[in-house]
Image: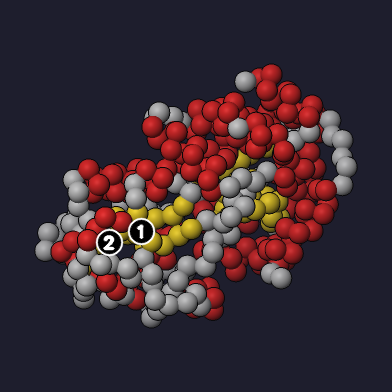
Amino acid sequence: MTLLKTTLAVTGLLLAAPAAFAAEDCGEVTIAEMNWASAGLAAWVDKVILEEGYGCDVALVTGDTVPTFTSMNEKGEPDVAPELWVNAVKVPLEAAQKEGRIVIASEILKDGGIEGFWVPTKLAEENDIKTIEDAMARPDLFPGAEDSSKGAFFNCPSGWACQIITANQFRALKGEEKGFELVDSGSAAGLDGSIARAFNQDQGWLGYYWAPTAILGKYDMTKLDLGVEHDREEWDNCTVVNNCPEPKLNEWPRSEVFTAVTKEFADSNAVTMDYLGKRAWSNDTVNELLAWMGDNQATNEDGAFYFLENYPQVWSEWVSEDIAQKVKDAL
């Protein structure tokens, strides 16, 4: 059992014990509002429940996977990262746990996250594209590069861990030699917009994406087979390392998506840790919420209130009856 899993198991045992906390014990909490939809939604759900149910004073701060982890590890802030995709920071995260700087509160996505390279299902079926090599053999099917003679291979926005991973995978695939250009999507909105535009224009699209997301709920996409197994040593020592000199194609592992907190915060905020230790939801639930948010141009705050109003059977399991009633009264 890995250190991550061991810590999570121990945390769960501790949180299973009966506890009664006064709301005033909560105090101030800083939570990272990551700049992708599911994480931003989670941050706002935590904010509303902790403020209305427990009387906490919650401040949200802008975050990204690597910068947020680095700040928590080196500066002890923010207190909480609700949705930390740990594949890109597994080694330093395990070190931070071992050395007593960061604690795993829960696995927020119960069935884990999904990452990989995707193409529209219709295009895949029409052109018999099943693997990444099948796609790389047809740059003509994937417009969108600045150089119109090349195919577009869409990367993640700057600051996201997947940007480094995708760049290394692209070089391992010899993307440039095969007639592709690695396209910087610029932002989460830019990445989503490139997919929406491809579907609206009935064109091909190839690049990195993940679940749970509204995009994969709205558009029929196929995850390509990379044709290789996951190599943990290669992943930790090269795949996630910026500008690794000789990257090899490497399958994504099942993405463990945790709620991480600083050790200082965990030790001094039992009331918050009790809640965070029980707070987890499924990809299906999150996909439904993100689809609603997309259809209604809703903010993270809107999505949080929609969830609390319409999914009490999910979140009421995370809190006591009296806390649940306080939250319901505030809606």
- The mark that comes first in sequence, 2 or 1, is 2
Judged left or right of residue 296, residue 29 is right
- In the foreground, 22 or 206: 206
Amino acid type of disc 2? Ala
For disc 1, the neighbor class at 10 Å (few under 14, some 14 to 19, many from 20) is: many
Could you tell me how far apart the alpha carbons at marks 2 and 1 are, in whole angstroms? 7 Å
SS for dot 1:
strand
Q: Is residue 297 above or below residue 83?
A: above
Say which residue label 2 marks. 124
- In the foreground, 101 or 254: 254
At a point 45% along the width and 60% down the height, the residue shown is: 115
Given the current orientation, which residue lies at the most extreme bottom position? 246
At a point 79% along the width and 58% down the height, the residue shown is: 10
SS for dot 2:
helix
Report the disc number at residue 222.
Answer: 1
Residue 108: where, in percent of width, then height?
62, 49
Residue 69: where, in percent of width, then height?
57, 55
Whether residue 63 is visible to the viewer of this picture, yes or no, is no
At a point 38% along the width and 32% down the height, the residue shown is: 295
Q: Is residue 4 above or below residue 331?
A: below
Query: In the rendered structure, are the residues bearing label 2 and label 1 in contact, judged by CB atoms less than 8 Å apart?
Result: yes
Amino acid type of disc 1? Thr
Q: How is the image coloured?
A: secondary structure
